[in-house]
Amino acid sequence: MSLSNEQKPDEEDLVNSVIQGNTLAFGVIVRNTEGLVAQVVFRMLSNTEDRKDIIQEIYVKVFRNLSEFKFRSKLSTWIARIAFTTCVNYLEKEKRQPDSRPLEQDEEGEDPMGQLSPDAKYSEPEEHVFRRELSSILTVEMEKLPPLYRMIVVLYHQEDLSYMDIAQVTGLPSGTVKSYLFRARRKLKENILAQYKQEEL
Amino acid sequence: MTTIHPPDSEIQAYSLDRRACAPETAEHIAQCASCAARVMNYTMLFSAVRDAPKPVIDFDVAGTVLARLPGYKKASGLSDWLVYAVAFAAIAFLGMLAWVLQRDLPGMFDRAASMMMYVLLIPIAGILIWQGYDVYRRYQRQSGILG
């Protein structure tokens, strides 16, 4: 069994401490990973009332199964995997299948929304306006993405997880993760551009 | 410069890391306003996603989860020790009082000072009863977690 390259020595010490009964060390693990867990839970579950219970359930599972963690991945990735599967199980239990249907797949290279006119160049004031409006439009359009795509986008761009890390979290092949990420980004861009042009009119 | 516009996947890859793209792709984008605009759109999108507010958990996750774990012992604070000290002192005081006044105890309740005794004894009894109930409640909670 080989340790992952990014295994921090203190991470192993923390895990061993918890296994030996040090629950305060577990508190450290919780604080180090709650941001990532929040990303998974908040993006997968729209129901805000259940998030608190789900988060607690995730960490109770982590505590009970920590002795089975073999350091084949980063601890945070392993915990994120538990968070993801807990969310999926919750959605299935609530009869709400996690919407992981693929976004419409267009032929590579085609941009259904059309590109900007060949000579389009943003003048500085226009670009500044676009940036300010982008964040508000982005929030709305992100919510329209299927939960799995939404989660993958933030894990990559906000949490800086690699394709391999995201693959370990979701249980999907890394090629599939890459494909989903590509489609989600394109969908976001298309919808945002459409929204922006609509507001301009 | 190649006249074939790169597919969206390459535009995205270029927006993320220009150095990782094929030289011909970079050359085309540098000379094609349309593709440069596509790159800019993606660059701004990625930047906006990265800068978007992250979700925040608004409760003490570690504390809440630790309290649910079996065998978890919350570190006793100063207030807990103070209450135990007061309870012990009250019991010791009562015991000492009873020993000192053992001969006069039966007659004390007949005198006017008996009211003072009630004023003293009732709050002490209340504290002891509350402490006993608190210990019982903790035992019930721990039993529930383990069960």
Image: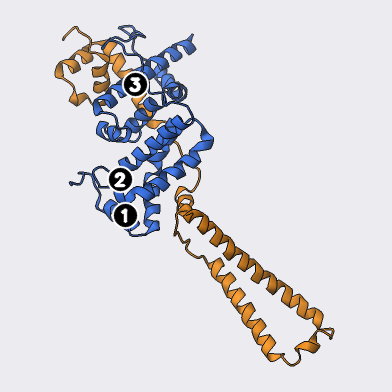
Chain colours: A blue, B orange
The residue depicted at 55 percent of the width and 67 percent of the height is: B80
Residue at 57%, 72% in the rendered image: B84
Residue at the spot x=46%, y=45% of the render? A56
Residue B48 appears anywhere in the view:
no
Is B58 or B3 nearer to us in this picture? B58
Quarter of the picture holding the N terminus of chain B: top left
- Image location of residue A107, percent across then percent down: 27, 10
Tell me if residue B121 comes above or below residue A104 in the rendering: below
> Mark 1 vs mark 2: which is more N-terminal?
1
Chain identity of mark 1: A
- Mark 1 is surrounded, within 10 Å at the Cα level, by few (under 14), some (14 to 19) or many (20 or more) other residues, namely some
Spatial CA span between label 2 and label 3: 28 Å
Q: In the picture provided, is A20 more to the left or to the right than B76? A: left
Chain ID at mark 2: A
Quadrant in which residue B103 is drawn: bottom right
The correct choice, above or below, for B4 with respect to B66 in the image is above
Q: Name the residue under label 2.
A: A75
Three-letter amino acid code at the position of disc 2: Leu
Mark 3 vs mark 1, CA separation in Å:
37 Å
Q: How far apart are marks 1 and 2 (CA)?
A: 10 Å
Between B44 and A159, the one nearer to me in the picture: A159
Q: Which residue is drawn at 27% across and 20% down?
A: B12
Residue underneath mark 3: A185
Find residue B139 and report its horizontal and vertical position in percent.
54, 62
- Where disc 1 sits, the SS reads helix
What kind of element bears circle 3? helix
